[in-house]
Amino acid sequence: MDHTALSAPAVPVPRQLPSEVRDFTGRAQALADLDTVVSDLATGPGPLVVVEGMGGVGKTSLVVRRAQRMAERFPNGTLFVNLRGGTGRARHWHRRSC
């Protein structure tokens, strides 16, 4: 009789971030500001950063760029939620501009 321990099947790690925009330029200050916000929140419980603004200004490209560069800090996976078409403004407990 074989008493080899059976291991649970590996659970796939979610990697849902979209691909980065290839032609991403002129956002060095916005990336630096976003880094500061994320670093300031990293010591707290489950940081959540919301980037809001007019349509077409590059919010998604900015956030995807930063998230792709930080993905290794999240070994359990990365998720992406498309909020296009949302209505109203985000509510903030602590608001900080980027």
Image (spheres, rainbow, N blue to C red):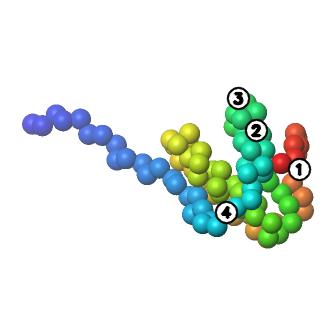
Q: Position of residue 48 (x, y in %)?
A: 74, 44
Query: Closer to the N terminus: mark 1 or mark 2?
Result: 2
Query: Closer to the N terminus: mark 3 or mark 4?
Result: 4
Q: Nearer the viewer, mark 4 or mark 2?
A: 4
State the CA–CA distance, disc 4 to disc 1. 29 Å
Q: Is residue 84 left or right of residue 54?
A: left
- The residue indicated by pointer 1 is 91
- The residue indicated by pointer 4 is 24
Compared to 86, does 32 lie above or below? above
Disc number placed over residue 43 in the picture, else none: 3
Query: Closer to the N terminus: mark 2 or mark 3?
Result: 2
The residue nearer to you, when weighing 3 against 41, is 41
State the CA–CA distance, disc 3 to disc 4. 29 Å
Q: Position of residue 6 (x, y in %)?
A: 26, 39
Q: Nearer the viewer, mark 2 or mark 3?
A: 2
Disc number placed over residue 36 in the picture, else none: 2
| Residue 49 seen in the figure | no
Q: Is residue 61 left or right of residue 97?
A: left
Q: Residue at x 58, y 52 (%)?
A: 68
Indicate the quadrant containing the N terminus: top left, top right, bottom left or bottom right.
Answer: top left
Q: Position of residue 21 (x, y in %)?
A: 62, 65
